[in-house]
Image (spheres, rainbow, N blue to C red):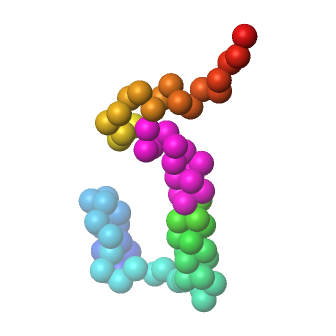
Amino acid sequence: MENFLHNLIHAGLFIPPLRPQAYLDPGSGSFLLQLLIAGLVGAGFLIKGYWGKITAFFRRDKSKKDDDTPNQQP
């Protein structure tokens, strides 16, 4: 009864209990590591794909923007 009352008070106040009853199986750590690695690799590909736009944003010389268009000969 005391444990039930204790949990009821914590649930009502949105305070986590002092002894959480959580279980992480051994595969959870490797899954979180895979998520972290996949996020870093994905960010790398995203930066690689937009590298020209990123450098153009920080470039001071705006006349280089005209060089990106192909030469159109009449």
The image shows residue 53, relative to residue 13, as above or below, that is above
* In this view, 6 is above or below 49: below
Residue 60 on image: x %, y %? 32, 36
Up-down: is 53 above or below 44? Answer: above
Looking at the image, is 60 positioned above or below residue 46?
Answer: above
Q: State the residue in front, 4 or 66.
A: 66
**Residue 16 falls left or right of residue 54:** left
**Which residue is at a point 43% across and 44% down the rendered structure image?**
55
| 50 in magenta | yes
| Residue name at image x 55 percent, y 77 percent | 33
The single residue placed furthest to the front in the displayed view is: 74
Left or right of 36 in this view: 62: left
Q: Is residue 25 magenta?
A: no
Main SS of the magenta part reads helix
User: Which picture quadrant has residue 26?
Assistant: bottom right
Magenta residues, start to end: 43-56
Quadrant that contains the C terminus: top right
